[in-house]
Amino acid sequence: MITLDLHSAPPRLVVEADVTNQAGGCRVQLSRTIDFQKDNDFPPVSGASVTIADNAGNVSVLQEVSPGTYTSALLGMTGVSYQLEDNLRYGHGHRNFHNACGHPF
């Protein structure tokens, strides 16, 4: 048996984001990490202000539809870069992503 000496660490923000050209548009999931020894039940982050902006200056405000899940009807387009901004009670962050494939989503 192998025993790992894993130390606790402060929770970190986890951001999962999907932008698609399909019905439903975009979805962002915010949660926090937990210690390795705990069950894989990652606590959702509620009450955030989440926006996605494209490189043309269009901004979409996402609505929280369930704890930690934010959605918008924004439809992604090929060749467009997007920036995700989240404002949390504990700080905020910017994350950039784009469709690097150059073909439809």
Image (cartoon, helix red, strand yellow):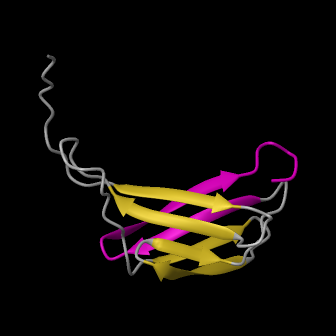
Q: Nearer the viewer, residue 75 or 39?
A: 39
Q: Is residue 90 above or below residue 2?
A: below
Magenta span of residues: 81-105
Residue drawn at x 20%, y 52% as measured from the top left: 10
From the top left corner, tell me how far across and down residue 51 is, in percent: 58, 75
Residue drawn at x 40%, y 76% as measured from the top left: 67
Q: In which quadrant is the N terminus drawn?
A: top left
Residue 68 as seen in the image, left or right of residue 61: left
Q: Quadrant of residue 23?
A: bottom right
From the top left corner, tell me how far across and down residue 96 is, in percent: 61, 55
Q: Is residue 37 above or below residue 23?
A: above
Residue 63 as seen in the image, left or right of residue 39: right
From the top left corner, tell me how far across and down residue 94 is, in percent: 52, 62
From the top left corner, tell me how far across and down residue 53 is, in percent: 67, 70
Indicate whether residue 87 is drawn in magenta: yes
Q: Is residue 52 above or below residue 77?
A: below
Residue found at the very far front of the displayed protein: 1
Magenta stretch, overall SS = strand
Q: Is residue 89 above or below residue 13?
A: below
Residue found at the very far right of the displayed protein: 103
Residue 50 as seen in the image, left or right of residue 35: right
Residue drawn at x 30%, y 50% as measured from the top left: 40
Q: How many marks?
A: 0
Q: Quadrant of residue 37?
A: top left
Q: Nearer the viewer, residue 27 or 98?
A: 27
Q: Quadrant of residue 74?
A: bottom right
Residue found at the very far top of the displayed protein: 1
Residue drawn at x 76%, y 50% as measured from the top left: 99
Indicate whether residue 60 is drawn in magenta: no
Q: Nearer the viewer, residue 10 or 23?
A: 23
